[in-house]
Image (cartoon, grey):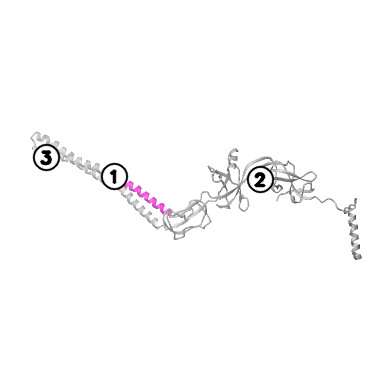
Amino acid sequence: MNPPYLTRWIFGLTVFSAGLLMPGCKSEPVKGAGAPPPIPVTITTVKAEEVPVTADFAAQTYARDTVDVRGRVAGYVEKWLFRPGSEVKQGQVLYELDVRPYRASVDQARGSLRQSEADLQFAKQQVALLQAQANLAVVQSALVKARQDYERVKPLVEADASSKQDLDAATAALAAAEANVNANKANVEQAGLSTKTQIDSNAGKVEALKGALTNAELNLDYAVIRAPISGRIGDSLTPVGGLVTPTSAQPLTTIVPLDPVWVRFKVTESDYLRWSAHGGTPANVPITLLLADGTEYAEKGHIENTLNQIDPRTGTLELQARFPNPHRTLLPGLFGRVRVQVDKRSNALSVPQKSVQQLQSLQSVYVVDSQNKVQTRVVTPGPRVGENWLIEKGLNPGDRVIVDGLLRVRPGAVVAPTPYKGD
């Protein structure tokens, strides 16, 4: 037998169950309950506008005119006159070698030149030629006297006023004088040729010694090593006391020009062909450099060079751009991205990227109608422009697209929209 309290509990449960099963019975709604409040969302209103289409490419900075500083003459480093990592100017003194051997060579070359110039000056005075010419004048005078003696004696001999012996003596003296004159004339010619040879020889020697002096002075100047270009200098690879040689495989240091800085990046064959169809690469369009930390470099660059062939291994073409670098912010070897404008769309529609939802192969957005109700709209995104997608199909100007609050809404839900102001 069941206890009384258990019997009452079973009876009450039976009555309650029967009441639930009776037809026509329904529970009354709780007083005060109503429709849920509108869901707050942010929206952007789609409008047609002219939009530049950009593309990003991996890039790296480099220095075009990097110079290795090397010695032109051999010597030991006596002074090291720069701070690694500092900016140097073209012509600034970087190293000083031991100049004593080169200064001695300059003094020696200068002395030899002076001696040769003195020899040349002496040759130009033509002392030997003048002496030969003086001797010729003497024998020519003797010839005149001998001829006069012969002319006086000959009539006397013919008139038997003088002996034939006197005529023979006069004739012999005349012949000797004539031979002497001819010999001295030959001496004059020989002296003239010799003097000219000496002058030419000494002149050539003077020119050679001038070249030797210039070379010695150059070597003395090369013993002071100067910056060949302006730029940022690296560390010294040769210490004070180290030996510098012109044939050393290792440079003394390296200078990198930083303004401007160059950036190389590669584009695909399809990019190149698309640009070619529109007149070639966008050389006149400013390009943006995005650094590795995501920041945008303040200065704009321009494409300066396009290489002459596609790389068969990667199917890409290298382009080179130049960026101003007045504050030396950029260094060679930095990785980043360049953003290049590749097209310009008229009457284009765009929405923020985060407003587009992906479901399998379909992309869609939530649109708010005039009654603030949510509708689903399938769209076809085009190229990405900054933080937005260009929409090829699915939207019209004036459509209000939900940007924030996507996880809380469903089609048909009522929302309270506010304008999207960006992140």
Q: Farthest residue to the front: give it.
A: 1
The secondary structure type at the circle numbered 1 is helix
Q: Quadrant of residue 390?
A: top right
Q: Position of residue 42 (x, y in %)?
A: 75, 49
The one nearer the camera, 414 or 229, is: 414
Magenta region includes residue 198: yes
The mark found on residue 197 in the picture is 1
The residue depicted at 10 percent of the width and 39 percent of the height is 166
Please report whichever mark, 1 or 2, sits nearer to the chain's N-terminal start. 1
The mark found on residue 372 in the picture is none
The mark found on residue 169 in the picture is 3
Q: Amino acid at mark 1?
A: Thr
Q: Amino acid at mark 2?
A: Arg
Query: Whole-Å distance between the Cαs marked 1 and 2?
Result: 87 Å
Please report whichever mark, 2 or 3, sits nearer to the chain's N-terminal start. 3
Q: Position of residue 262 (x, y in %)?
A: 55, 48
> Going by the image, does 179 lie left or right of 283?
left
Nearer the camera: disc 1 or disc 2: 2
Magenta residues? Answer: 195-222
The mark found on residue 384 in the picture is 2
> Going by the image, does 20 lie left or right of 351?
right
Nearer the camera: disc 2 or disc 3: 2
The secondary structure type at the circle numbered 2 is strand
